[in-house]
Image (cartoon, grey):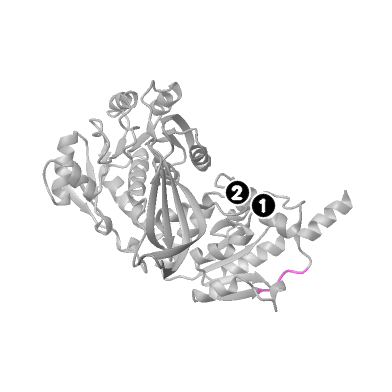
Amino acid sequence: MRPLVVVGDALLDIDIDGSADRLCPEAPVPVVDLGREWLRPGGAGLAALLAARSASEVVLLSAFGEDGAGRRLIELLEREADVVPLPLTGSTVCKTRVRAAGQSMLRLDSGDGRAAHGVLPARAEQALREAGAILVADYGRGMAAHPGLRGLLTELAPKVPVVWDPHPRGPAPVPGARLITPNESEAAALATDGDEASALARNLREQWSSDGVAVTAGSRGAVLADARGTRSFPIAGTSKLVGHARPDTCGAGDRFATAAAAALLGGADLAGAVTEAVDAAARFVAAGGAAALSLSDGPGSSPGRPESSRSERNAFEVAARVRRSGGRLVATGGCFDLLHPGHVTLLRQARALGDALVVCLNSDESVRKLKGPTRPIVTAKDRARLLAELESVDAVAVFDETSLATLLERLRPDVWVKGGDYAGTDLPEAEVVHRHGGEVALIPMVEGYSTSRLVAAANTVN
């Protein structure tokens, strides 16, 4: 299958989590004690990461600055997509949210970068010509207005499905786009007539000469206007939010657009693509939204580290799915440096205690702190891959030694499993588990197996 190519403006999103339990004496505003910092690609960068959930091969065309934020952004993206960089004039745009107790308190925007409108690089043109579907994620920073890109997209639109996620500060989509996906407020700002979602969709379809326009309407799903008329696509009952009084909807529009583009890439018609997109966006919000894709930039971690893989983000989706269905989430943690029968038995018994098992895996730096400079023998990236192949394991999340409590705060397992060798000891993570209504279970270890023994035996043989 040909790749899904994402074109648009990549940004760097930063979430700073903290606590706010007092007011400033100079003014009636909360004082936020800053804690951990989380990074993720934003804009078209987020769209590329989300597209990788639905398409086997994703290529991102975006403009990147030569500054530290630009290099960090590329590092975050290259784990999931083939990045084709174009020049950026100015500095990388960063959007920083300060949050306390899960509530956004403030957003700080910095950077003035815009895509430079020079000659389109040959690699970018080749990527577009080889695309099976194209998603334009316009964030008003010049990529969608690039003359060379627009000319090529206009040429390709009759032959390749083009999905366009517009921005009020961006240009109009090219004629012939297969699907355009504004939200209600964007549609109201861009349409020349109409106030209801259905009327807005019809007006914009005619205005933009596109095959279809899907206006997304949050918890009400989406409305599609195409050659067959106007139809509503509500969120299915199984995808409705459960237990989220204030869901984080950041990135929901990107998830909708990427899922629709992937469906069209797979041969779906417009109605099928919108159906899949509505369901994907609802599940994405229920799983925690874009925040669930963030990587910690705290001590001992790096946003570009290869060991923080897609499985880490899937862990939060698994947790959300289990909670929505009223199931029981089990989690366990450890180094799992050399997998052996003792590990397999522990994981199988842990999985039997609930409906899904998430393994919290020590990062390489964390293992070195615990076991010494000669460990780990197997990198975290490969340890995660091996664990994910086990039938008993539903997802893997890599953590640094100092951040396990943070990870458990986000996972909120119903059962936290440790080996029986921890009997009689105070587990530091127990407080977090108990605070969220969970329990701690100790499973007897299989005698005769440990990674340290295996390593010692191998050294003796050698």
Residue count near mark 1 (Cα–Cα under 10 Å), binned few <14, some 14–19, many ≥20: many
Under mark 2, the amino acid is Glu
Q: Residue 255: x percent and y percent?
A: 36, 48
Q: Which numbered dot is residue 307?
A: 2
- Say which residue appears at 38% left-offset and 56% top-offset: 106
- Up the image or down, 267 lies above or below 18; here it is above
Q: Residue 196: x percent and y percent?
A: 14, 52
Tell me the quarter of the image containing the N terminus: top left
Magenta: predominant secondary structure element?
loop
- Up the image or down, 78 lies above or below 116; here it is below
Under mark 1, the amino acid is Asp
Query: Where are the magenta residues, as a range?
Result: 443-447
- Say which residue appears at 62% left-offset and 69% top-offset: 349
Residue 441 left/right relative to 224: right
- Say which residue appears at 43% left-offset and 64% top-offset: 31
Q: Which numbered dot is residue 103?
A: none
Choose between 140 and 444: the one closer to the eye.
Answer: 140
Q: According to the image, label 1 marks what residue?
A: 364
Question: Residues at badges 2 and 1 in contact (C-beta under 8 Å)?
Answer: yes
Q: Is residue 446 magenta?
A: yes
Dot 2: element: loop
